[in-house]
Amino acid sequence: MTDPVWIAAGCAALLGSLCLALLFALARARQHIAYLSQQQEQETQQRDELLGKLSAKEVELNRLHAGLGQLRSQEQQLRAQLSQQQDQEQRLSERFENLANRIFEQKQQSFLSRSHKDMDAVLAPLKQQMEQFRQQVAHSHTEEAKQRHALEQQLRDLKQLNVQMSEDALNLTRALKGDNKIQGNWGEVVLTRLLEQSGLKAGREYEIQASLQQEDGKRYQPDVIIHLPDGKDVVVDAKMSLNAYERYYSSDDPAERERALDEHVASVRGHIKGLGQKDYHKLKGLRSLDYVLMFIPVEPAFLAAIDRDPSLISDALSANILLISPTNLLVALRTIQNLWRFEHQNQNAVTIAQQAGKLYDKLVGFSEDLQKLGRALDTAQGSYQNAMNKFSEGRGNLLRQGEQLRQLGVESSKQPDAALLKQALEAEE
């Protein structure tokens, strides 16, 4: 075969192969197209189904939205109703609570007012008596200290006083020789001065120149009458005759001194006799002791007479007379003043004991009032507890009933105390 033939044959074969390939590719394409068409139909069907479902969902969603709007509207209405119910319940709870508190406060205030008045009525006199008791005790201690100090001071000054009085007496005697009346008046002045220094009170514990009468009608004026705490009286008479003693004191002649001293003793004995004849113990209104004090205002003159004739003391005692000098008299006066001080202290002790008894009685009454107060507080506490039980405890309590009213639609803007409401609800179960 020639080349053109081979070429033509090759071309024909190639063309046939191409045709076969093309036919095969076309068949494959048709099959693929058919498959795609089938797939498209399925996808279209699925899309239609999905669109249908979506449409149904949209309808359902719209319905749900509409229902949600209704629910929200209902919720708002319910919330408004709930708020109103809570407000009403809170107001109701507050009313109950205020009522209970007001009743309790009224009872408590009334009770406390009565209790305060009763306690003030008890404590005021109690406080006053305790203050009086304290003042009396303090006054007693203060007075005792003052008097003790005064006694010590007076005893220290006694020696100097006696020396001064003796010198004054001698000077007065020299100036008033022979004038026994003025010397006697000066002796009374010395006696008065000692009384003033003793601490005794004039007009209360002693009297000066008191005029008294005997049964026979004679009137006497003792120089001083000293009252004793036991109802007795002591008479003191000052006797001053220093002419003989002045000569004894001033003379340098032993014989003259002896004569003057004997005259001085005789003068003292004469005063003893004259005083014994006055019978002061028989004076009306005088509760005198058996003895009268004869006061010799110059200590050296007293000592000189006693030293010269010691029997003067016994002779005076026989006439119910006690001879006494300034030193002895001041000691006696201070002793009497101490007796009066003890008497006043005893009287104060009696008063203190009486007030202590009253104080104890007040304390007993106060303890009884405190017991009454405790019982009344227990009663008030019980009443309060009963009111709270009715309000928030037990079945059918008021707070539970208020909650039930709220649940039934009663409007309230306030909520009761959560713990109290919980307690009320638990008590119902």
Image (tube, rainbow, N blue to C red):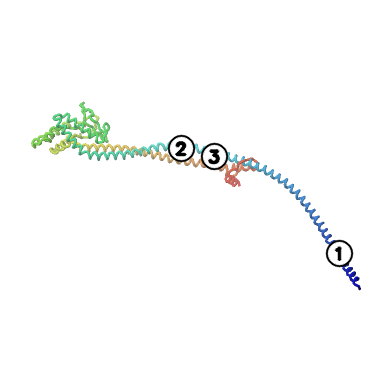
Question: Pointer 2 and pointer 1: residues touching (CB < 8 Å)?
Answer: no
Amino acid carrying label 3: it is Asn
* Badge 1: residue crowd in 10 Å (few <14, some 14–19, many ≥20): few
Amino acid carrying label 1: it is Leu
Quadrant of the snapshot with the N terminus? bottom right
Residue at 24% across, 35% down: 197
Residue at 39% across, 37% down: 128
* Badge 2: residue crowd in 10 Å (few <14, some 14–19, many ≥20): few
Residue 11: give x, y in percent of width and height: 88, 68
Q: Which mark is residue 177?
A: none
Name the quadrant containing residue 270. top left
Q: Which type of secondary structure does the marked residue at label 1 adopt? A: helix
Mark 2, mark 1: which one is toward the viewer?
1
Name the residue tied to disc 2: 116
Mark 3, mark 1: which one is toward the viewer?
1
Q: Residue furthest front?
A: 3
Name the quadrant containing residue 292. top left
Question: Pointer 3 and pointer 2: residues touching (CB < 8 Å)?
Answer: no
Q: Residue furthest bottom?
A: 1
Q: Is residue 408 visible?
A: no
Q: Is residue 108 visible?
A: yes
Residue 91: give x, y in percent of width and height: 60, 39
Marks 2 and 1, how far apart in space? 127 Å
* Number of residue marks: 3
Left-right relation of 167 to 10: left
Amino acid carrying label 2: it is His
Marks 3 and 2, how far apart in space? 21 Å
Name the residue tied to disc 1: 22
Q: Which type of secondary structure does the marked residue at label 3 adopt? A: helix
Q: Which mark is residue 101?
A: 3
